[in-house]
Image (cartoon, coloured by chain):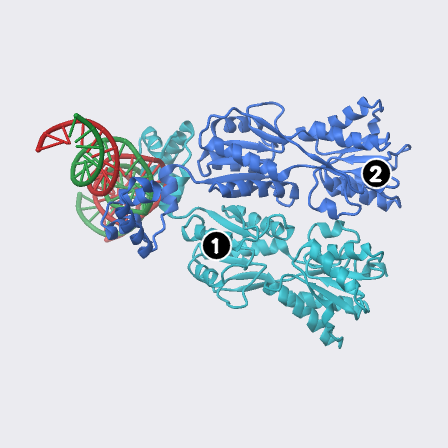
Chain colours: A cyan, B blue, C green, D red
DNA sequence: TTCAACAATGTAATCGATTACATATTTATT
DNA sequence: AATAAATATGTAATCGATTACATTGTTGAA
């Protein structure tokens, strides 16, 4: 491997000059620069990035920790991160925890050891104290999920409560009064928020909250399916179901169909997320579209500010979702 | 940041000894080791990985280049890679080319510059000469896609031709004679193979190949949809459609339905891949299930062998797919 | 012409872990 | 007890790019 000193020798300059040609070209005389560039080309010299990283104590790499690479909700955010990172000369490492909290902490060590310049977490399901501590000392941004316990971590998220309120209200406006909810895992703040938004909407419209309409899912297709079967078996079954994720909504619809009922004719179903597949699914899902790409992009922008040391306050950036009315709630079928 | 020399000082030994405690513990006397470990603990010492990478010229990182993170075909392979990599102490960097060939070459430079110890490519849509050259000099494994032009690149793939033959034959066995095909992009060898397998199966069963049944898609939902509309508009439309990917099969089914026809009653449709969603889709897709996880895992195993320098011949590892008969072809509905 | 100010380049230390080689210590063998 | 062999530890060079500081060269003002 040719190294800088080889280039220096060929160009009859010092390594310092070669380095400057590469780092601060305008401090080098035109003539010298030319000699050096020629030598670089002739030797096909490429700087040793490992040496550079070591010396600079930076890697131009950021780590994205996602709980599940198979869940498109996260992949779509990654696309936004990747876009902005690439634009700014950062490479993206993906860390896939597969929902194992411990692995997330393993990744935090990478950050502590300066193996990456910064980190974006797509989940807050980790040890909170550790997270806050790390976020305090190193560039870290949290996306989608957030911490209720602390405002010390810069976060990009939607307003789950409001968005959940909106979509519930949409069902109410369509005339539904018996609206059930399938929540996500309630140890996640965003899932509790979606539950609250749903309840608030009902209360504001003087609809009594019926507790057996409140079911608890876990974001999986199966849990959407199972909970719906339970709901349908009630004495007084709902006429509409609001699932806290599209995947669960699909499970719900599958369950409705399995009972010989139709969506939205017999039961309306709405989801949350608007993943790629929700348009393809039949009936196409009415859902709350999260601005995934923008979430990722914004997160990366904030992270970059932190990395380069701009003294930004910890912020909570709230992005807007958009209600997508499609077939599963009946709105477009009237 | 505490460094090794701090530990050495506290433990009253040399840095060499500290390093040995970490790297080759059994060459150090028990007593000394204890002193050193105590010092490490007391100072909360963590080795500077950047310095280590630099010195060792290795990073314990591998790069996975995928054409599209949103396509679950690739994500599922990544899960297998990630599993095996983590097990062996490697971290996985994800490179997302978004189908831009140029970006793939950017990633190859990371490999050349020793920023990663090895590389797994999930696509062969790159400059072939460059690929072969890089594969010759650095640890690289190709998965899923492969090169017809060269056997110099270690590859893990299924037998697309055979698998395609099998699923086509399945349709023939169900009584279909008018079988159309929606191919993937034909600049990919695996797509040409799937086309060939389809044609071979027809010929072996003395079914005339009708050229207007051969349509060309691009792996997208939309292309499955559009091509199917064209097929349905033929004078003598097919009774079955074999799409070269599940996503296109879904598009095909959507198109069939849009014409008021039913799948599989009026037209049978089969796909290829068996992504997560194919089970959820209605009708559930009959498809050829690729062993995604195993493909990723195997690729990582081979890559590791190359990285540690075991002189392995370049190989072409062929893994078995499995036919999944579900609703979309009618097999389970008889 | 002289000197200050600035530009261009070189010298050599530095980042921190690793390791070849040298030295010191212990153990085993006769 | 003497010596060889094996074990344990230390010394110092090394990886290659970067950069503080030193040196030399150049320009312009008085």
The chain letter for the residue carrying disc 1 is A
* Disc 1 crowd, CA 10 A, few/some/many (<14, 14-19, 20+): some
The chain letter for the residue carrying disc 2 is B
Q: Quadrant of the N terminus of chain A?
A: top left
Q: Residue at x 66, y 32 (%)?
A: B320
* Disc 2 crowd, CA 10 A, few/some/many (<14, 14-19, 20+): many
Camera-nearest residue between A283 and A182: A182
The picture places residue B19, in percent across and down from the top left corner, at: 31, 43
Q: Residue at x 44, y 62 (%)?
A: A133
**Tag 2 residue:** B268
Left or right: residue A276 compared with residue D6: right
**Tag 1 residue:** A105
User: In the rendered image, is residue A29 in sight?
Assistant: no
Q: Residue at x 54, y 59 (%)?
A: A125
The local secondary structure at tag 1 comes to helix
Camera-nearest residue between B119 and B293: B293
Q: Which mark is residue A311?
A: none
Give the alpha-carbon distance from disc 2 to disc 1, as whole Å. Answer: 49 Å
Q: Quadrant of the C terminus of chain A?
A: bottom right
Q: Residue at x 66, y 70 (%)?
A: A196
């Amino acid at each position: 491997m040719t190294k800088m000193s080889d280039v220096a020798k060929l160009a009859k300059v010092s390594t310092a000059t070669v380095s400057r040609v590469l780092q601060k070209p305008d401090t080098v005389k035109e003539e010298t620069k030319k000699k050096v560039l020629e030598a670089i080309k002739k030797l096909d010299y490429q700087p040793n990035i490992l040496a550079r990283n070591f010396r600079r104590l930076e890697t131009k790499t950021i780590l994205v920790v996602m709980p599940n690479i198979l869940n498109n909700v996260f992949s779509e955010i990654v696309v936004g991160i990747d876009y902005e990172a690439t634009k700014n000369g950062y490479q993206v490492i993906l860390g896939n925890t597969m929902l194992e909290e411990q692995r997330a902490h393993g990744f935090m060590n990478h950050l502590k050891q300066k193996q990456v310049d910064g980190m974006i977490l797509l989940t807050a399901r980790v040890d909170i104290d550790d997270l806050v501590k790390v976020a305090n000392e190193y560039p870290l941004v949290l996306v989608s999920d957030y911490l209720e316990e602390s405002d010390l971590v810069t976060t990009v998220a939607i307003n789950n409560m409001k968005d959940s309120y909106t979509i519930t209200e949409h069902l109410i406006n369509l005339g539904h009064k018996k609206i059930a909810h399938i929540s996500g895992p309630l140890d996640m703040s965003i899932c509790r928020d979606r539950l609250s938004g749903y309840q608030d909407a009902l209360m504001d419209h003087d609809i009594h909250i019926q507790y057996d309409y409140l079911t608890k899912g876990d974001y999986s297709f199966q849990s959407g399916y199972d909970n719906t079967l339970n709901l349908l078996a009630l004495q007084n079954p709902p006429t509409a179901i609001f699932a806290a994720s599209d995947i669960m909504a699909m499970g719900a619809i599958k369950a409705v169909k399995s009972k010989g009922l139709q969506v939205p004719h017999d039961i309306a179903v709405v989801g949350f997320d608007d993943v790629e597949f929700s348009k393809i699914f039949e009936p196409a899902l009415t859902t709350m579209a999260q601005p995934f790409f923008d979430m990722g992009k914004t997160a990366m922008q904030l992270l970059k500010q932190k990395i380069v040391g701009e003294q930004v306050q910890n912020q909570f950036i709230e992005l807007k979702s958009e209600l997508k009315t499609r077939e599963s709630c009946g709105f477009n079928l009237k």
